[in-house]
Image (cartoon, rainbow, N blue to C red):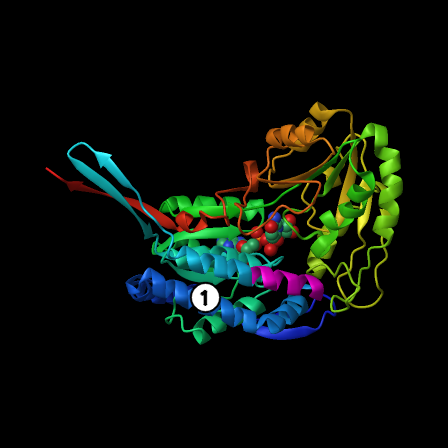
């Protein structure tokens, strides 16, 4: 069976990709298990060198990958190029991690214990369609560095850059089947990976609903899981903040990648005493957002991923919320959706409580810091958020009280590959990225040596 891959900015079919069935997915797991012996027998220094070569192969192919990601996902080309640079940096960072899996020596009665970090085995990385290549790399690289083999399962909507990534792994000299890609649907390919007893760990990024299925399936054979799920992050603007800077940054804090970002700051909490002034600054900032052809240098926001997703996002506006401002969208083909600001004084509008995964933000007033924290935490999610204030004490006190894994102060961007990333509450389990990510793909083994 094959599936058509669509460019969401033009609605053109740009590729057809094979959809594997359960049996072919099982073969991939068998090949991965066999490759484990080869990968484990390579020294840490040589593994690091191979992973560096892999990173450099991606760097050499960066422009092609950026163009491909833009065609398949509708990211602006500016964004795809920026992301590709970060991907290469992230790959180089984790190439080095292969040589930094350092155990401990622990004095004990009668001798000494030493610890080793052993690979978990076969790791499946199940990725969504919003940032296909970046999310694949975040899971894959620390897993490989720790001596695991990896099977990548991209979304059926966005497999193209992941397919190219695996070709580059081979070109860079990684042994056969150390990195594989299995294209297909969640229920066929994804579920087979979840159910297979030879898969030791699953890294899943996607919806909270499927995240629950992943965890339930993994529980059957106690597979390790890392889950990166949804979000409904708050962007909190205190009255003493640089309101102009906060208002100018707020639109792209949620409209970037057409709002299809788990960290999108889709609730804009503004202190009541300055909310009118803030909205006056926000409106022109939203009107200046350019939606359109993602390959144009001036475009800020591309299309949504699919017609189905556009219907889902549109449904949030069906019950006529109070719209403050909307940006323009182009006419003609493409799954466009206008960046939209909504106001909800009680914070109860569906746009204020549910993950929309589109370019929609809801402005909600708050009275004081207790009120801001209460509203920010009044959600089952806990992924990201921002705090805008000139008072660093206020910023840090608030940051400590927000139930979320990734916060930024006077900025709307918190994710850096050098620092841990992940969610509180129903936004996920475990952490990706940061200095310790490779350890998440290991089992700690303790060996006692008698000195008697
Ligand atoms: O995600 P899914 P989709 C949210 C967002 C979006 C919605 C649906 O709200 O509108 O989820 O997006 C695979 N066993 N997020 O459909 O369904 C699937 O094939 C194993 C938020 O893309 O969760 C794909 O590869 N795998 C999120 C991946 O899981 C299964 C990012 C994600 O699919 C499976 C993306 C199964 N039973 C969407 N069913 C974020 N916050 O970052 C599906 N899959």
| 123 magenta-colored | no
Quarter of the view holding residue 24: bottom left
Q: Is residue 408 left or right of residue 2?
A: right
Task: Characterize the magenta stretch by its predominant secondary structure.
Answer: helix
Q: Is residue 126 left or right of residue 414?
A: left
Name the residue carrying label 1.
52
The image shows residue 165 at horizontal and vertical percentages of: 51, 69
Q: Is residue 247 visible?
A: yes
Q: Which region of the structure is painted magenta?
A: 76-87
Q: Residue at x 79, y 38 (%)?
A: 242
Given residues 167 and 398, the one toward you in this image is 398
Q: Is residue 360 above or below residue 140?
A: above
Q: Is residue 188 visible?
A: no
The image shows residue 376 at horizontal and vertical percentages of: 68, 32
The image shows residue 136 at horizontal and vertical percentages of: 52, 59
Provide the secondary structure element on which disc 1 rests.
helix
Q: Label 1: few (<14), some or many (≥20) within 10 Å? A: many
Quarter of the view holding residue 69: bottom right
The image shows residue 365 at horizontal and vertical percentages of: 79, 31
Q: Is residue 251 left or right of residue 370?
A: right
Q: Residue at x 81, y 54 (%)?
A: 338
Q: Residue at x 60, y 45 (%)?
A: 230
Given residues 110 and 309, the one toward you in this image is 110
Q: Is residue 179 above or below residue 196?
A: below
Q: Is residue 125 left or right of residue 271?
A: left
């Amino acid at each position: 069976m094959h599936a058509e891959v669509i460019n969401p900015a033009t609605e053109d079919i740009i590729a057809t990709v094979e959809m594997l069935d359960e049996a072919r997915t099982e073969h991939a797991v068998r090949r991965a298990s066999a490759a484990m012996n080869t990968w484990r027998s390579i020294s840490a220094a040589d593994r690091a060198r191979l992973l560096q070569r892999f990173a450099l192969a991606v760097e050499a192919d960066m422009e092609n990958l950026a163009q491909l990601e833009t065609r398949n996902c509708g990211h602006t080309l500016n964004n795809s190029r920026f992301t590709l640079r970060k991907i290469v940096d992230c790959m180089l960072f984790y190439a080095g991690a292969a040589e930094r899996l350092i155990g401990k020596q622990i004095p004990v009665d009668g001798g000494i214990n030493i610890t080793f970090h052993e690979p978990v085995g076969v790791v499946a990385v199940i990725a969504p369609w919003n940032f296909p290549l970046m999310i694949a790399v975040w899971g894959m690289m620390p897993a490989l560095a720790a001596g695991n083999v990896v099977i990548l399962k991209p979304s059926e909507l966005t497999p193209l850059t992941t397919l190219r990534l695996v070709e580059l792994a081979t070109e860079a000299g990684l042994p056969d089947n150390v990195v594989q890609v299995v294209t297909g649907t969640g229920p066929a390919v994804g579920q087979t990976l979840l159910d297979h007893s030879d898969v030791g760990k699953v890294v899943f990024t996607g919806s909270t609903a499927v995240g629950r299925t992943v965890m339930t399936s993994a529980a059957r054979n106690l597979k390790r899981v890392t889950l990166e799920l949804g979000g409904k992050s708050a962007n909190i603007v205190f009255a003493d903040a640089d309101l102009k800077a906060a208002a100018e940054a707020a639109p792209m804090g949620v409209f970037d990648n057409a709002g299809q970002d788990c960290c999108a700051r889709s609730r804009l909490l503004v202190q009541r005493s300055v909310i009118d002034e803030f909205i006056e600054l926000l409106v022109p900032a939203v009107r200046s957002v350019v939606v359109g052809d993602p390959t144009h240098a001036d475009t800020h926001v591309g299309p949504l991923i699919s017609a189905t997703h556009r219907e889902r996002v549109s449904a949030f506006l069906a019950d006529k919320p109070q719209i403050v401002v909307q940006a323009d969208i182009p006419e003609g083909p493409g799954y466009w959706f206008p960046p939209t600001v909504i106001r909800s004084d009680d914070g109860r509008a569906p746009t204020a409580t549910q993950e929309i995964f589109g370019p929609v933000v809801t402005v909600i007033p708050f009275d004081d810091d207790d009120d801001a924290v209460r509203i920010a935490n009044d959600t089952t999610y806990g992924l990201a958020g921002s705090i805008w204030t000139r008072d660093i004490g206020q910023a840090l006190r608030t940051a400590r009280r927000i139930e979320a894994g990734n916060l930024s102060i006077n900025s709307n961007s918190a994710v850096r590959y050098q620092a841990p990333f992940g969610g509180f509450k129903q936004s996920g389990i475990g952490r990706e990225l940061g200095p310790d990510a490779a350890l998440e793909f290991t089992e700690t083994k303790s060996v006692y040596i008698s000195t008697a």
